[in-house]
């Protein structure tokens, strides 16, 4: 997932452009400081065209710029095929470089819209009736070389077969959506997309515009999803520094993967996943937490991100009264039993047992903070500190955020409680 480019500060005094290329997030050429903001904006428009017979998607990037602001775009070729465009296009199996004309031009490619996960089930699909995939699946993430401080004004549109419609994380007006991303100079569409003959239900809950969409004919409980969010999103809004502006939930049945996956401002949930499992946990709310926090971790600390998402999914159910205190305690107890099978905690990707163990650690940390502060602080305050820091999580960062409230290193995060974490390289 699913980070902001590093924006170099504007230099105040110099007379002419300097032809030195800087590569820092979005590489740039230096320009005179008297240039206006509009002079530094170039328009990028993406058109996504499903090709159901080929199980593929055609993508067209149209660039318009007042002068030569965008000099070069570079991305991993990946599954993209037939890459062609105006200007200079250099492409092989590993990397593609596009150097567009000074006033803009087009770049075109095709991508397979079917992808099967290891172990079975698809996380990208397209047939004659519907399709479900992420924008990142069909639009490779690109690095750019531009004039300094130049930025894109990005839009997105779909060219669809008759009778089809599309739902993404973006709000469309007259068939075109503005694609915004705070802090980025080159903006690309992100998140889950569903196309075809689809049904959608919308609601605004606790300041969040929610859309639940799925192909017609699939047994997706759109209203049940909205009902659960009506109970729980208000509780989440009380924790976060600001509510999530938009939340798009896409779903489908076979042949999609039977789980949940988050992306920026959106998530995928298989139609057969229950809103609340028999053990009292919720895949839906787990993925909502990923969307709401946007947290990621340094290698070896994925357990922190997954543990927070699972723990707070339980907390939201409990605080909203959706489950009883007894059911909440039973869920924690079941997770603690599962945690015993985890041999380590600090692996590359947190397994189910490791996430269960992470929940027991995080629950203990929450209780320790509440006790040490006389119930004036809790894990909520630590979570907000981590969100405002806007950095990849590490064990040291978690310890430091907790120490601010406890006054000492938390016992819950002592190395004896974290098997395998002593093997993570320092600084990771």
Image (spheres, rainbow, N blue to C red):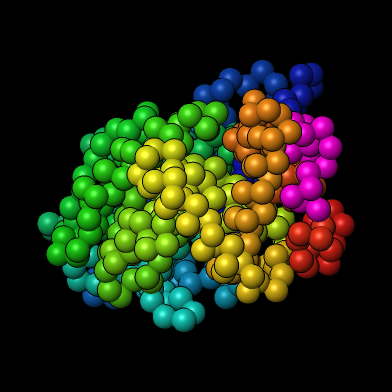
Above or below, 118 relative to 47: below
Who's the residue at 42% across and 77% down the image?
116
In this view, the residue in front, 10 or 190, is 190
Q: Position of residue 384 (x, y in %)?
A: 62, 34
Q: Nearer the viewer, residue 386 or 106?
A: 386
Q: Which residues are magenta?
A: 400-414
236 horizontally vs 350: left or right: left
Identify which residue is drawn at 16% across, 60% down.
216
Q: Residue furthest right?
A: 426
Residue 305 left/right relative to 109: right
Main secondary structure found in the magenta portion: helix
Q: Position of residue 130 (x, y in %)?
A: 23, 65
* The stretch drawn in magenta includes residue 407: yes
Residue toward you, 374 or 177: 374
Given the current orientation, which residue lies at the most extreme left position? 163
Give coordinates of residue 229: x percent, y percent. Answer: 33, 42
Quadrant of the rendered image containing residue 382: top right
Q: Classify residue 308 as left or right of residue 65.
A: right
């Amino acid at each position: 997932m699913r980070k902001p480019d590093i924006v170099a500060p504007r230099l105040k005094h110099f007379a002419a452009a300097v032809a030195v290329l800087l590569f820092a997030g979005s590489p740039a050429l230096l320009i005179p400081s008297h240039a206006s903001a509009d002079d530094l904006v170039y328009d990028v428009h993406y058109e996504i065209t499903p090709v159901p017979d080929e199980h593929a998607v055609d993508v067209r990037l149209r660039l318009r710029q007042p002068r030569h602001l965008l000099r070069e775009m570079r991305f991993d070729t990946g599954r993209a095929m037939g890459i062609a465009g105006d200007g200079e296009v250099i492409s092989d199996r590993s990397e593609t470089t596009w150097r567009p004309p000074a006033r803009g031009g087009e770049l075109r490619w095709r991508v397979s819209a079917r992808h099967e996960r290891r172990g079975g089930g698809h996380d990208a699909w397209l047939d004659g009736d519907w399709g479900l995939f992420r924008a990142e699946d069909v639009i490779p993430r690109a690095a750019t070389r531009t004039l300094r401080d130049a930025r894109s004004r990005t839009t997105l549109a779909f060219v669809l077969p008759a009778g089809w419609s599309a739902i993404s994380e973006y709000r469309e007006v007259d068939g075109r959506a503005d694609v915004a991303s705070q802090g980025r100079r080159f903006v690309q569409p992100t998140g889950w997309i569903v196309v075809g003959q689809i049904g959608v239900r919308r609601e605004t809950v606790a300041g969040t515009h929610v859309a639940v969409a799925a192909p017609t004919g699939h047994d997706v409980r759109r209203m049940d999803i909205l009902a659960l969010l009506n109970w729980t999103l208000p509780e989440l809004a009380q924790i976060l520094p600001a509510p999530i502006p938009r939340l798009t939930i896409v779903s489908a049945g076979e042949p999609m993967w039977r789980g949940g996956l988050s992306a920026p401002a959106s998530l995928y949930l298989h139609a057969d996943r229950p809103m609340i499992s028999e053990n009292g946990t919720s895949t839906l709310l787990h993925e909502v937490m990923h969307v709401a926090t946007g947290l990621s971790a340094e290698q070896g600390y994925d357990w922190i991100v997954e543990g927070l998402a699972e723990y707070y999914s339980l907390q939201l159910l409990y605080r909203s009264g959706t489950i009883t205190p007894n059911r909440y305690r039973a869920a924690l107890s079941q997770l603690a039993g599962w945690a015993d099978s985890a041999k380590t905690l600090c692996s590359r990707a947190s397994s189910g047992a490791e996430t269960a163990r992470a929940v027991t650690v995080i629950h203990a940390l929450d209780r320790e903070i509440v006790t040490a502060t006389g119930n004036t602080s809790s894990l909520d305050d630590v979570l907000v500190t981590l969100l405002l820091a806007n950095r990849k999580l590490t064990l040291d960062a978690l310890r430091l955020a907790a120490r601010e409230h406890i006054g000492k290193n938390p016992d819950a995060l002592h190395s004896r409680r974290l098997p395998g974490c002593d093997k993570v390289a320092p600084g990771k």
